[in-house]
Image: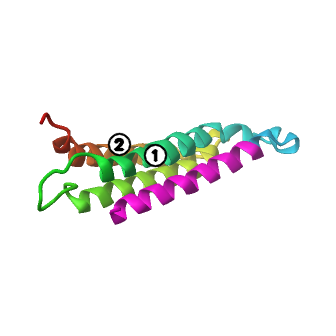
Amino acid sequence: MPGVTRWLIRAAMLYLVAALALGIAMQAPAAAQHPIMRAVWPAYLHLLVLGWLTQLIFGVAYWMFPRYSAERPRGSEPMGWAAFGLLNSGLVLRAIVEPWHAVGGRGGPLLVLSAVLQLLAGLAFVANTWPRVRER
């Protein structure tokens, strides 16, 4: 299993645990009334969908899709690492800034940056994986 895949899958499992813990915290009666806990719902969804599901898909696809070539079976390894770094940078930034912004903070530009980082991660993944999806 390639190193990029291992890191993507490990990070996905960490995001799953973090999302589940946050989901439990959001349901606690004492915490449910706190404004931050009500504002954390979008961050929770991002941790679950982008952190867990998308990252797991990236990792498995990078590992299991058809080979690109004998010399570079998985395409560009630096592009795989770029997708990993961009996705996680954007996701961590969003998880921190989104609740703060929702309760009146001035995190708008940082939210845009987090979205751009996540978009670039998706583009890096697609650019690296697209040539591997071809007819036989």
Pick out the residue farthest to the front. 136
Q: Is residue 23 magenta?
A: yes
Residue 45 sits above or below residue 7 on the image: above
Q: Amino acid type of disc 1?
A: Pro
Pick out the residue farthest to the top. 135
Quarter of the image containing the C terminus? top left
Q: Which residue is mark 2?
A: 119
Quarter of the image containing the N terminus? bottom left
* Picture quadrant where residue 78 is located: bottom left
Spatial distance from mark 2 to mark 1, Cα to Cα? 15 Å
Q: Nearer the viewer, residue 37 or 121?
A: 121
Choose mark 2 or mark 1, whichever is in front.
2
Element marked by disc 2: helix
Residue 10 sits above or below residue 66 on the image: below
Q: Residue at x 51, y 39 (%)?
A: 49
Residue 112 sits above or below residue 1 on the image: above
What is the x, y in percent for residue 114? Answer: 44, 48
What is the number of the mark on residue 109?
A: 1
What is the x, y in percent for residue 103? Answer: 67, 41
Answer few, some or many: residues within 10 Å of disc 2's Cα (few below 14, many 20 plus, some between 14 and 19). Answer: some
Q: Is residue 36 left or right of residue 119?
A: right
* Picture quadrant where residue 77 is located: bottom left
Element marked by disc 1: helix
Identify the magenta region. 1-25
